[in-house]
Amino acid sequence: MPDVAAAPADTRPYSPGLEGVIAGESSLSQIDGEAGALRYRGYPIGELVEAGSYAAVAELLWTGDWNPGAKLPCQPVPDAVMTALRALPRSARPMDALRTAVSVWGSVTDPSWPATPDQARALTAFSPSALAAFARLRQGLEPVAPDPDLDLVAGYLYQVNGRAPDTETARALDAYFVVGAEHGFNASTFTCRVITSTRSDLASAVVGAIGAMKGPLHGGAPSEVVEQIHEVGSPEKAEQWVRDTLAKGDRLMGFGHRVYRAYDPRAAALRKVAEGMEHRPEWLELAIAVEDVALRVLQEKYPDRPLRTNVEYYAAPVLMGVGLTPDLFPATFALARHAGWTAHAIEQGANNRLIRPDVRYVGPAERPLPR
Ligand code: ACO
C-alpha cells in the first residue's frame, strides 16, 4: 500500500452517531433523561396512559388538540396490498411484510406533499389491518376484515385472532401503544424526517422509518427479554445468571438507554399495566425478581454509568399477556410508532428545510490516478 497523504484536517465539530447534536426542533415530545420524564406536548406519559387512549394521543400529536373521546377504527386493506401480502413467503419477517404493505399502500393512495393529519389517520389506521392480515396468511388462515365499531388497538387484536379482545386486554395493549407512540429524534423518526425533508411522500417516509426500526439496536429487545427470563428459570438462579451474562460480555436486554439515565418512565407505566393484567404471564414475578438483581449488579459494575430498566423490559410481559407471539413484537412496536412518525412528517413539512449534513472526509489528499 503506497504511503498516501491524508486530506487536510477538517476541524469542525463532529459527534459520532450524532450523539448530543441538536438536529431539529419539535413540539411533539420532551424527554428528560436525567429525571426519567417523557411528555407528549407537555402532558406526562403516566397521565396519558391512565386517562388517554392511543387514538386520543395520536390526535394530540397530529393536531395539538386533546380529545379523550377520539376514535380511530382500523381501515380495510386495499386489494393491491392484499395481493402483495399473499405473494410473500410465509417465512417473511412481519417487519418486512409491514414495510411492503406500506409501500404498496403508498402506490395506491399516492399521498401528496406535505403530509396532513388526514393522511396520518389513514396510514395509521391501515397498517394494523395489513400486519394482522399477514399474521393470518402466514398461518394459512384467511384475513379478517376490520370491525368499524372497534377502536384501533382492539381492532388490531380482532384481526390477528379473529375474535375481539376483552376490555382489559385491549386496554393493556392500548397502554403499550401510548408509550410507544413517540420518542423524539430516535433513528427511525429521524429517518422519517430526512425523507420528508426532500418533499417525498408520507408512505415513503414511513417505509424508511420501518427499515430503520427493523435493526436490533432500535426495535428488537422485548422478544430477547422473554428469552432471557426463560433462561434464568427461577429467582434463586438470578444473581448467578446476571453475573455470568455480564462476565461473558453479553448485555442484559431491557436495561440501559442512550438518553435515560434514570428509570425509563415508560417502563414504570408498563410495569403497572403488566402487574394489573389478569392474563399476565406466569414469569412476571420472576422478571421483577431478576430486575432487582440486575439493577444491583449493573450499579456495582458501572458505578459511574447509570444503567436502569428501559421500556422494552416491561413491554415484554404486556405483549405476551395480550397473546401476541414474540415475532410480532417489533412490528407491533412499529404500529404504535406510526403516530409519532407521521406527526413528525407533518411537523417537518410545515417548516421544511432539506436535511443535508456534512461529512468529514478522512481519505487521501488529491493524487494522480495511476496510469
Ligand atoms: N447490559 C450490560 N451492559 C450494558 C448494557 C446492558 N443492557 N447497556 C450498556 N452496557 C454497558 C456497555 O457494555 C458499556 O460498557 P463498556 O464501557 O464496558 O463497553 C457501557 O454500559 C456503556 O454502554 P453504551 O453502549 O455506551 O450505551 P449506549 O447508550 O450506546 O447503548 C443501548 C444504549 C443500546 C440501549 C444499550 O444500553 C443496550 O444494548 N441495552 C440492551 C438492549 C436493549 O435493552 N435495547 C432496548 C433499548 S430501548 C429502545 O430502543 C426502545
Image (cartoon, rainbow, N blue to C red):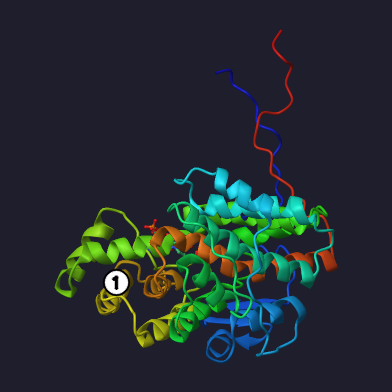
Q: Is mark 1 within 8 Å of ligand 1?
A: no
Residue 37 lies left or right of residue 306; in this view the side is right
Q: Which residue is mark 1?
A: 294
From the viewer's side, name the closer residue of 95 and 9. Answer: 95
Residue 94 is situated, as x and y percent measured from the top left of the image, at 50, 54
Front position in the image: 56 or 26 = 56
Residue 217 appears in the figure: no
Residue appearing at x 72%, y 67% in the figure: 122
Mark 1: which secondary structure?
helix
- Quadrant for residue 38, please give it: bottom right
- Tag 1: residue type? Ala
Q: Is residue 49 above or below residue 144?
A: below
Label 1: how many Cα within 10 Å (few below 14, some 14–19, many 20+): many
Residue at x-position 37% and y-position 63%: 253
Residue 274, quarter of the rendered image: bottom left
Residue 323 placement (x, y as % from top left): 39, 70
Residue 353: x and y in percent read 84, 59
Q: Is residue 151 left or right of residue 311?
A: right
Q: Residue at x 65, y 60 (%)?
A: 77
Quadrant in which the C terminus appears = top right
Closer to us: 67 or 46 = 67
- The answer to which of 53 and 81 lies nearer the viewer is 81
Q: Position of residue 210 (x, y in %)?
A: 60, 56
Note whether 196 is above or below 1 in the view shown: below
Q: Quadrant of the N terminus?
A: top right
- Judged from this view, the residue extending furthest toward the top is 371
Residue 143 showing in the rendered view? yes
Tell which quarter ligand 1 is in.
bottom left
